[in-house]
Image (spheres, rainbow, N blue to C red):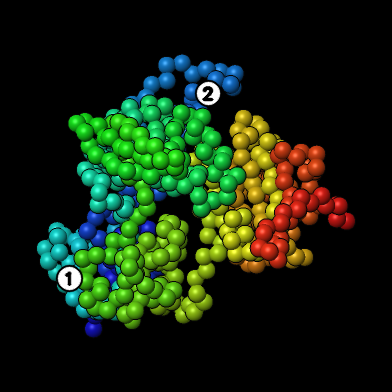
Amino acid sequence: MSDYDLCVIGAGPSGYAAAVRAWDFGKKVALVDKGPLGGAGIHHGALSSKTLWELSKDYRKALHRDRGFVAESVSLDWGQVLHCVEQAVDEKVEQLQRQLDALSRPGHDHPGSIEFIHGAAHFESASRVRIEGGDQGMRTLTADHFAVATGSRPRELPEIPVDGRTIITSDHIGGLKEFPRSLVILGAGVVGCEFATIFANYGQTKVYVIDRADRILPFEDEDVARVCSRNLENKGVTVHHRCRLVSMEVVGPQVEYTIEHHTGGREAIRVDKALISIGRVPNTGGMGLEEIGVKLDDRGYIADDDGQTTVPGIWAVGDITRDLALVSVGEEEGRHAIERIWGGRTVPMSKDNFSTIYFLDPEVATVGLSEQEAQKQRIPYKVAVYGYGLVNRAIAMRARSGFVKILTTDCDDMKILGMRALGVHASTTIEAVALVMQHGRSVRELANLLHPHPAVTECVQDCVRMLLGTSIHKPHVFQSELRLSQVSYEADGTTSQLALRPVASK
């Protein structure tokens, strides 16, 4: 008989979700982690960085001078900013710990329990792990099932000497003693652009971004990237478009980096700090996974089939799989694995309607396909774009920059393919669309959904009405704020885009 029904290795969002879901089934669970409770998702990722973004946005808003008032003597202290971030992290960790304490022993009406074990786990076999480095010294435990949820860490390059002080990753932001006077960010993906936004919002740091592509956020539609890029540059950020990093090294108290422009010319610039933001890599090494038969791909991710690894009884959830590295996805993967083990779930987990948020300026929320993804897959579609400039709540907030874009199939059913929202409260506009997508319903389901007024979500309703030809604001009148198009593909492989002017349906 095993010591535990389930051993979860990794106490980040996906591992914690798996452990609690197993408790729901009345199982005895060991939750093992060598780091702090909550993992990178709490301490160095989604919660900490987004708290920093929210604080920077508040500070930026306090400096506005176009609203009938001027805030005088607005002081700024980096140490106090970090203290607020630490408070947010501590609050969340306390919540997690409070629940673990409550679930640590079986109750008279519930047989489940979760034991948190601090230490590093190493597989001795497919049913046994050795735990070292914790308060209890070395110990071994057995379990009927294992869920590996060890997450990921920032990717580094061997030629760049990350020291955690002058050349840093996102893990080291909390170690900064003051605002750097200047900062270069290598990488123009989501995380790099988020930190560029944060430091630019505070206005204490000259920010540079090295971007190998033609534009930032190359995986997103050009209209989304264009607005975000313009706002960064309006804050004083210099984006090195189409540039290759030649070298980066610490020179005295600073960093010198050399870039090569697409024209061939080279430029050397010195800054106080450099932030490496070129993606993340899975934490799958040093656990003995391959030795017991768990297959890893060439980048170290665990090969899985809907969570099941190549070894029966061992599951993979969260960032160590090749799926989207998002907290929401990881949590759902953790829950899904447990439901496959004990809940009789046989339907594979679908990720088609998972939504994401980019904490930029403005906020960006996405679900489903973008236009460039639909075109890459050569899917005919209709698209409606509704500008925030026509949304009463955005007008009232003096935040008219942004839009909502909805893609549907080019047929009578008009199933939703995807949505992009860019602007204040963008994340609140996604939820109803994601639900309609999950159930495979027509976009028409959203046309008659009543919203409170004034609310940013009203733009979703009129965007849908525009697709149906019944919008209050007409695209041929507001041509700069609204767009309605039909995209198809010619026999020669070219993309054809036709602007629509629908007649109102009856």
**Label 1 to label 2: alpha-carbon separation:** 56 Å
Q: Is residue 197 left or right of residue 6?
A: right
Residue 291 position within the rendered picture, expressed as x and y whole percent measured from the top left: 22, 76
Height in image: 428 above or below 209?
Answer: below
Q: Is residue 214 left or right of residue 338?
A: right
Residue at far front of view: 264
Q: Nearer the viewer, mark 1 or mark 2?
A: 2
Q: In terms of image quadrants, where is residue 491?
A: bottom right
Residue at far right of view: 506
Of the image marks 1 and 2, the number of the one nearer the N terminus? 2
Residue 207 in sight here: yes
Q: How many marks?
A: 2
Q: In terms of image quadrants, where is residue 275?
A: top left
Q: Secondary structure at mark 2?
A: loop
- Residue ID at (37%, 72%): 303
Q: Which residue is mark 1?
A: 130
Q: Which residue is mark 2?
A: 64
Height in image: 43 above or below 381?
Answer: above
